[in-house]
Image (spheres, rainbow, N blue to C red):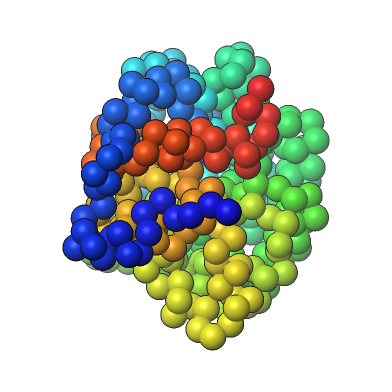
Amino acid sequence: METNLISRRSALAMGGSLTLAAGTGLKSLAAAESGRLIDVHHHYFAPAWMTKFKKEIEESNGARFFTWTVQTALDEMDKTGCATAIVTCGGPGTWNGDVQASRSASREVNEFGARMVKDHPGRFGFFASVPLPDTEGSLKEIEYAMGTLKADGILLWSNYGTRYLGDPGFAPVLEELNRRKLVVYVHPKLTSDLNDEKDPLRALGINWENTTRTISSMLSSGILMRLPDVKFIFSHGAGLLPMVAARFAGKSPEKLAALKGLYMDTAQTTTNAGAWGAITAFAEPSHILFGSDFPYVNDGLSLGLTSVKLSPAEAAAIARGYAQKLIPRLSA
C-alpha cells in the first residue's frame, strides 16, 4: 500500500517545511530524468483556431501566443528534458456561443493535435476539445476524437459562463465520458465566474477558485459520485481542494472517497510550500502528475522543477510513472 509522499507527522515535525533531508529535489530531477518527463499540462494553439478565435484568445490573455509553433514547444521540451507532452487547447477553448463555429473549432483543434502526435512519434499526446455546452456536438466530437483520432482523453473547462460541471445540463456528456472510462482533464477558465474585470483574482491571472467551484458543484449535485470510471485530472493541484476537502465531504465517506479519487497536476504548486504540503497530505500519491502549464508560465517547464525534495523513486513516479499508469500507451 502506497504512503503519502510526505506524511502529516513529518510535515508537522518540520514546522511546515516540505524539504526532505535525504531526497532528490525536482530541480535535480531535470537531470536525473532528462528525456523521460511526461508533462500532462501543456497547451497548444492550432493555427486555424487562432485565426477564427482571435478576439476570444486576446480577451483570455493569450495574444502573446500567436507566435506559438510546434517547434517552439519541442524546443522547450528538449531544453527541459521532457519526453512527452499531453497537450490541451489554450484558453478560452473552443466554445464561443456559436454552435457551428464551436463545433468546427473543436474539430480543427483536435485534428491538429492528432497531427502533432503522428508527426512527432512519442513526443506528444492530446486531450481532445469538445464544444460544451453543446451536448449533441460534444457527444459527436467525443466519438470522433476517441474513435478516429485516438485521443488520450477529453479536455473540459471548469465553467462555461456561470455554469459549472455539476450543472444538470452537462450530465449526458459526463455520463458518456464515464461509460467510456476516459481520462478527463479539467482546466480553469481565466475569467472569473462573474466576468468582472475588476476582480482582483482575474487581474492576477489566478483562477483556481473556478476549479474549486466546479469540484464543489459536482459534489453537491451528486454527479461526481455517479462517475466512478472517469479519471479526472484537475490542474494546478486541484485548486483549493486539498485545503478544503474535509469541509466539502463533511461526514460523508462516499464524498470523501470521490474526492480522493481525483488526480491533480503539479503546475504552479511546487514553489509554494503551503500548497505542496496540502497536496501531499491529501492526495493519493499515485494521483499526483507532473504538469508545467507551458507556455503560460514564463519559465516554461522549469517552474515545476524547483523547491521541493523527494526521494528518487518518488520523483520518478511524479515525473512519469504515475502518468504511465493512468495512460498505459505512454509506457511504450
Q: Quadrant of residue 253?
A: bottom right
Q: Position of residue 212 (x, y in %)?
A: 44, 66
Q: Residue at x 31, y 34 (%)?
A: 24
Q: Position of residue 200 (x, y in %)?
A: 23, 64
14 sits left or right of 256 in the view: left
Q: Quadrant of residue 301?
A: top left
The residue lying furthest to the bottom in this view is 251
| Residue 49 appears in the picture as rendered | no
| Residue 213 appears in the picture as rendered | yes
Q: Nearer the viewer, residue 322 or 115?
A: 322
Q: Residue at x 68, y 29 (%)?
A: 329
Q: Residue at x 51, y 61 (%)?
A: 159
Classify the position of the N terminus by image quarter. bottom right
Q: Residue at x 52, y 78 (%)?
A: 249
Q: Position of residue 94 (x, y in %)?
A: 56, 44
Q: Height in image: 91 above or below 193?
A: above
86 sits left or right of 299 in the view: right
